[in-house]
Amino acid sequence: MLHATTTAQTGPIPYDIVVLTADERHLRRRMLVLQHGEHLFVDLPRPVRLSHGDRLVLEDGRHVEIIAAEEPLYEVRAVTPEALARVAWHLGNRHTRVEISDRALTLQPDHVLMQMLIGLGAWISTIDAPFEPEPPRLSGVPHHHAHD
């Protein structure tokens, strides 16, 4: 069985690949099955969020490339940049993982959020695409605030 204990952002031509969803790319210890069927035990010193193109480094120095899987998502648009910013604020207030582009927000499907987005006047399309949400930015300050 293959074993990986470190990661890299670049490296040599990969030995193999593994296709993972956004949730699966947040890992520390897990058994993965590579595209060609081999099992890989990942045992990292701390949890990491891997992105498309990142690498798991095998004990012998070979690399396994991470491929972001296509998954069902909502693509959210609004009539103006200000309206899209308002939608983004409401999603952030609910600690929703969001991928941000210049014209749309992308998030994992949730029927409650969909109703909120419709109420805010957003346009929602269902798509299948790789999901690369913004990484959390923790300031080291404890999280203390109230929600309505």
Image: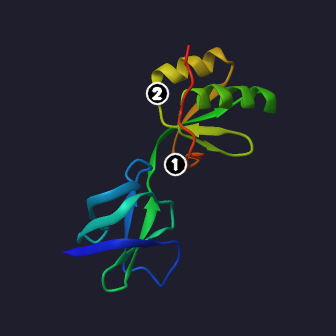
What is the count of numbered marks?
Answer: 2
Query: Any mark on residue 131, and which?
Result: 1
Residue in the foreground of this view, choosing between 10 and 34: 10
Q: On the picture, is 26 further left or further right than 9?
A: left
Q: Residues within 10 Å of mark 2 (few under 14, many from 20)?
A: few
The type of colouring in the image is rainbow
Please tell me which residue lies in front, 82 or 71: 82
**Disc 1 secondary structure class:** loop
Find residue 90 and report its horizontal and vertical position in percent.
63, 25
Q: What residue type is labelled 2?
A: Asp
Is 110 rendered above or below residue 54? Answer: above
The picture places residue 63, in percent across and down from the top left corner, at 40, 78
Mark 2 or mark 1: which comes first in sequence? 2
Per the image, label 2 sits on a secondary structure element best described as: loop
Disc 2 to disc 1, how far (Cα)?
Answer: 15 Å
Q: Eyeballing the image, is 112 above or below 127? A: above
Which corner quadrant of the image does residue 58 belong to?
bottom left
Amino acid identity at mark 1:
Phe
Residue at figure coordinates x 49%, y 68% from the top left:
54
Which residue, given by chain and number where applicable, does mark 2 sit on? 110
Q: In which quarter of the image is residue 144?
A: top right
